[in-house]
Image (spheres, rainbow, N blue to C red):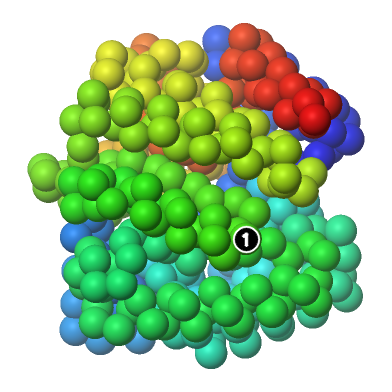
Amino acid sequence: MNFKDFLTYIYPKTLGFKLAYHRLGPAPRPITLTFSVTNVCQSRCKTCNIWKIYPEKHQNFKDELTIDEIRKIFKSMGRVYFFNISGGEPFLRNDLPEIVEAAIEHLKPAIIHSPTNALAPEKIVAHTQRILKIIKEKSPFTVFTVKPSIDGIGPLHDEIRGVDGNWEKLLETIKLLKEIETEYDNFHLELGTVVSNFNKAHLDEIEEFVHSLGIQSYRNEIAEQRQEFLNIGDPITPTADEYAELMASFAEKVRENLRKKRSLAKVTESLRLVYYDLAIKIVKQQRQVIPCFGGISNVHLTPYGDLWPCCVLGYSASMGNLRDSDYNFWKVWRSPKAAEIRKSIKNKQCHCPLANQSYSNIICNTMSLLKAMYNILYFTLKK
């Protein structure tokens, strides 16, 4: 996100979000679409059981949206600013570049992002190169980011991710994507860690390793129990006090490195500082600390065509299925069921530190936004 986009597109839309939040107007088009392109995954992570949907055959994409269906949905929806690809493992879909091409044509995003488990380096690189060629031809100013997961160093990473040899494949993926980063100004490599009970004692060494690689952006998110991940009841989340201590340490390291970042990373890291503080309060107080605009500013599309306000509420809060509405996004987005779900969120019947949604909540909250802007100015001007 840059200042021009923020001032001309994102911030003006917050008025519509606030009106919809207070039920004074219809839900406008969201700025962020997260699309889980598949639930298929080769990982067997301790923090996520999504792989159990297809436990036997990794390449079984039965009942998931086809590229033709996806095009219809994107065409109906119209422009978004952030297009977040999710999974499962997104790079397992052979048509991932075609999905991105459809997004560029109809959603016209400024930023496209995808995580990866890094288990198929050659395929990840091939898809990334194809995607970047499509972007160069059709939308040269669109930014594409890829975030391999790093949950430990060496054997610990393999243990948490549930696949022997994942660490070596992660290193290979990072090496190859760093090479691509030198070729494309609009491609950014990130790394991300899920903070859980399995790695909470090893986070300093993970972060030191990431910074030793010269990675511009490093994300840390707490391991959550989400319906999407089929992990409700699993003992994966650190205590509130442990999480607060860890996030405070992350925030300090972000401050130390912020001045060295490129402009895009500087903006996202400044938001991240506000997010860390917010996430600590949510986990400790077990409530919404600032208003949540889930199902208004952001929306989640599942591999089967369901619209969710977020992946945390997941199956219990489906607004409807786009296959049942002839792929008309607006029929589901402005349905009575969607309004009912938004009302429950406004009534604070849920709370979570989901990072993707929290960034939108920060932008829609005046005090939080001012804190983020202060961080940007302070670390830009400070020598």
Q: Which residue is drawn at 46% across and 60% down?
A: 209
Q: Where on the picture, by quarter, is residue 50?
A: bottom left
Q: Determine whether 245 is above or below 135 in the image.
A: above
Q: Where is residue 253 in the image (x, y as percent from the top left)?
A: 52, 38
Q: Where on the picture, by quarter, is residue 269?
A: top right
Q: Position of residue 80 (x, y in %)?
A: 71, 46
Q: What element carries label 1?
A: loop
Q: Which residue is drawn at 41% across and 14% down?
A: 289
Q: Where on the picture, by quarter, is residue 70?
A: bottom right
Q: Residue at x 88, y 65 (%)?
A: 140
Q: Determine whether 121 is above or below 352 in the image.
A: below
355 left or right, relative to 164: right
Q: Is residue 189 visible?
A: yes
Out of 377 and 44, give the one closest to the viewer.
377
Which part of the image, by quadrant, shows the C terminus? Answer: top right
Q: How crowded is mark 1: few (under 14 residues within 10 Å), some or many (20 or more)?
A: few
116 left or right, relative to 130: left
Report the residue marked by disc 1: 214
Out of 211 and 77, give the one closest to the viewer.
211
Q: Where is residue 268 in the image (x, y as percent from the top left)?
A: 65, 39
